[in-house]
Image (cartoon, helix red, strand yellow):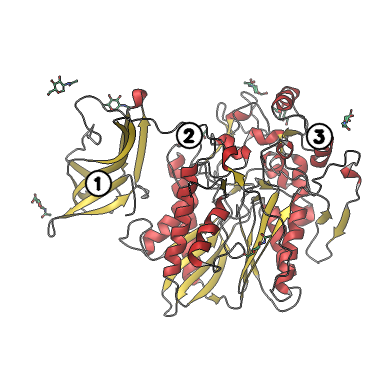
Amino acid sequence: QTNEKRVEWLKNGVLKVLQAKYGNLYRRDNVVLSGTHTHSGLGGYFQYTLFMITSKGYIKASTQALVNGIVRSIDIAHRNIRPGRIYMNRGDLEDSSINRSPHSYLNNPQRERDRYKSNTDKQVVVLKFTDLDGDGIGLLSWFAVHAVSMNYTNQMVSSDNMGYASYLLEQDKNRGALPGQGAFVAGFSSSNLGDVSPNTRGPVCVNTGLPCDYLNSSCPVGGTKMCKAFGPGGDMFDSTSIIAHNIYKRAKELYGKADKEVTGFLHSINATHTVRTHTHTHTHTNLQTHTCLIKKISLAHTFWIETLCQTCKPALGHSFAAGTTDGGGDLNFTQGAVVGDPFWDEIRDVLLGKPSNETQECHHPKPILFNTGEVKPLPWHPDVVDVQILLIGSVAVVAAPGEMTTMSGRRLREAVKQELESEGKLKDIEVVISGLSNIYTHYITTYEEYQVQRYEGASTIYGPHTLSAYLQEYRGLARAIAQGGVAKLPAGPQPPLFEDSRLFNLLPAAALDRKPANSSFGDVLQQVYPVYRVVRRADKTFVTVEIYHNRTSTWEVVCTDASWETRFRWLKGSGRQSNVTVEWHIPLQAAAGSYRIRHLGHAKQLQGSRPVVTPYEGVSAVFAVTPSYYHQ
Ligand SMILES: *[C@@H]1O[C@H](CO)[C@@H](O)[C@H](O)[C@H]1NC(C)=O
Ligand SMILES: *[C@@H]1O[C@H](CO)[C@@H](O)[C@H](O)[C@H]1NC(C)=O
Ligand SMILES: *[C@@H]1O[C@H](CO)[C@@H](O)[C@H](O)[C@H]1NC(C)=O
Ligand SMILES: *[C@@H]1O[C@H](CO)[C@@H](O)[C@H](O)[C@H]1NC(C)=O
Ligand SMILES: *[C@@H]1O[C@H](CO)[C@@H](O)[C@H](O)[C@H]1NC(C)=O
Ligand SMILES: *[C@@H]1O[C@H](CO)[C@@H](O)[C@H](O)[C@H]1NC(C)=O
Ligand SMILES: *[C@@H]1O[C@H](CO)[C@@H](O)[C@H](O)[C@H]1NC(C)=O
Ligand SMILES: *[C@@H]1O[C@H](CO)[C@@H](O)[C@H](O)[C@H]1NC(C)=O
């Protein structure tokens, strides 16, 4: 595909390969890509300009690796298709999430808040998959929490708390298998996590130990940068592990007791929402003068107001740059800003141009920092957005193209349930929200939360009525399903293809690698100790830990770089020399025996004048792990 002049965004890239392999089986309407929010992953695979800036460009190698990996897992699933049953269960998980913008949440109507016991959703919803003999083959679950237990100082690739929960359950079910190699698959999906943090001890001023300001998360000394959320553990590894174990244990319990069988039909339905409703320029028309049609939903349990107003051209507010108490925000921005800062407004005007009056009014009360919808010629943010619902019997999976806050998610679930059940054919539907699906559009708050303009409101890029617009779209999809499932929805506009020539990449190509004189790549710099005592207290991988079997005289891989107990650090030095350190945090249950650690890598060197990348490996000496002992 390197000769393609135009580049697809990720979901299209995946669909294209699937189409070539499977024809019309896996399509835009029945494939959902639901992402995770992590600060420990790769970037450069999303072509809208704002996202390319943070990753220094479009990185083809990242995109290709993601497409290949996603397609490969679909290939494996496809090869293993067999008849089976699905069971559903749900239950609450406490002590694993807090609301990081409680002030915004409190702006929702009292009567609505009174219906819920907490300002975040605590439910874990679990689907248990079995074969016809009743043997468990997999789990899919949803829980609303940001996967940001690892903070942004971490430079290792990590799947954070949700990924570790998935790893734990798979290791548990696939005893003895390497990560990702066993038959049992455990998926932990994101949900309406927009205002939900895993850092459960909450924010504190790190310099003084005092609480941060409730409204703007600022500290009396040092401002926003000093206000950080921590916990529940002593450091980020600890915290990741605690949250992951909580999620894993609860999901496993619910899985074990799941006995409500999911039956019925499969439906999938999709559409696009075009957020820029007025693309042509009527210079003399004030677009804001049209009347908002206010529809008061009259269901007994529904108290909010849906306003059928237009969505705005995308823009981010000042408080976006403040970041959150989970990290980010290097400049002096503060959450909760409803007035712009003249200094930054001027810089913005020079860089991006002044936002039009129309866009400013549309986003009110958000002071606009980045008017991404008005920058030409490259699109900075999506303005055609995928909306999609999958119905699996009595479970409806709503694929949301961003990060919905707790209350936004509750409203959406309720609206979809109401429409699905409106015709009387579908009953007792469990609606789950799969967050960060298909395309990324930042956050989605309620109209009331938007007024407060904390980070989530400032990052609701289509303006105050973003949620209302989505509610309409998803109601439409749900109604179409309720009315028989044969969707007769218009095709709708498609997101743009990206001209290859217009994508930029400021990352230099990987430089040549050097090594000290009289040495080889893969030389071990610091040997392992000959013996380690445990005390009480593959696929492709960069690292393996191997145990020796005397009987067969073979080495068996027991850990890879996907194992929680290994840490792989690449240290880039001066003069293009780099070192690698491998840590193996030997678990208590490690078998006694002879071990070695292997590192597999690639070095780029000139052969004549041509740079050539060649694989190398380095192996430690053999060391012993002896049985653990107890000391009282
Ligand atoms: C919905 O999915 C179908 C089939 O996958 C596709 O043909 C259609 O273009 C999609 N609609 C939109 C609006 O993307
Ligand atoms: C944050 O709000 C407090 C009042 O609650 C105010 O004193 C302080 O100046 C604000 N900080 C910033 C940086 O805006
Ligand atoms: C940021 O704002 C805080 C609080 O207003 C102030 O104490 C701090 O000096 C400011 N920092 C910079 C770099 O301007
Ligand atoms: C990140 O976590 C480490 C502990 O693992 C801690 O030392 C550091 O202060 C944290 N940094 C931020 C910005 O939260
Ligand atoms: C935009 O609003 C400002 C302030 O209200 C006004 O002075 C200006 O004329 C407006 N510009 C346009 C193009 O309407
Ligand atoms: C490299 O090895 C050669 C031959 O053993 C020796 O003459 C030379 O001094 C060594 N160079 C360095 C930098 O150690
Ligand atoms: C395995 O073989 C090595 C060398 O042949 C020997 O030193 C070691 O004791 C043996 N270990 C076991 C558990 O038999
Ligand atoms: C790599 O290790 C060597 C030998 O221990 C040391 O001299 C060098 O500074 C290290 N380089 C980096 C980038 O850590």
Left or right position of 486 against 93: right
Q: Is residue 548 above or below residue 379?
A: below
Name the kind of residue labelled 2 in the image. Answer: Thr
**Residue at which label 1 appears:** 534
Which residue is nearer to you in this view: 557 or 617? 617
Tell me if mark 3 has few (under 14), some (14-19) or many (20+) residues whose alpha carbon lies within 10 angstroms of its own: few
Left or right position of 369 against 81: right
Which residue is nearer to you in this view: 265 or 230? 265
Q: Secondary structure at mark 1?
A: strand
Q: Earlier in the sequence, mark 3 or mark 1?
A: 3
**Residue at which label 2 appears:** 153
Residue 27 lies in what quarter of the image?
bottom right
Q: Secondary structure at mark 3?
A: loop
Residue at x-position 30% and y-position 28%: 514
Name the kind of residue labelled 1 in the image. Answer: Val
Of tags 2 and 1, the one toward the viewer is: 2
The spot of residue 392 in percent (x, y) is 59, 71
Does the CB distance between marks 2 and 3 fall below 8 Å? no
Q: CA distance from mark 2 to mark 3?
A: 37 Å
Q: Secondary structure at mark 2?
A: loop
Tell me if mark 1 has few (under 14), some (14-19) or many (20+) residues whose alpha carbon lies within 10 angstroms of its own: some
User: What label does residue 346 carry, if any?
Assistant: none
Q: Looking at mark 2, is its residue's CB closer than 8 Å to ligand 4?
A: yes
Does the CB distance between marks 2 and 1 fall below 8 Å? no
Residue 147 visible to the viewer? yes
Residue 537 visible to the viewer? no
User: What label does residue 356 carry, if any?
Assistant: 3
Q: Looking at mark 3, is its residue's CB closer than 8 Å to ligand 5?
A: yes
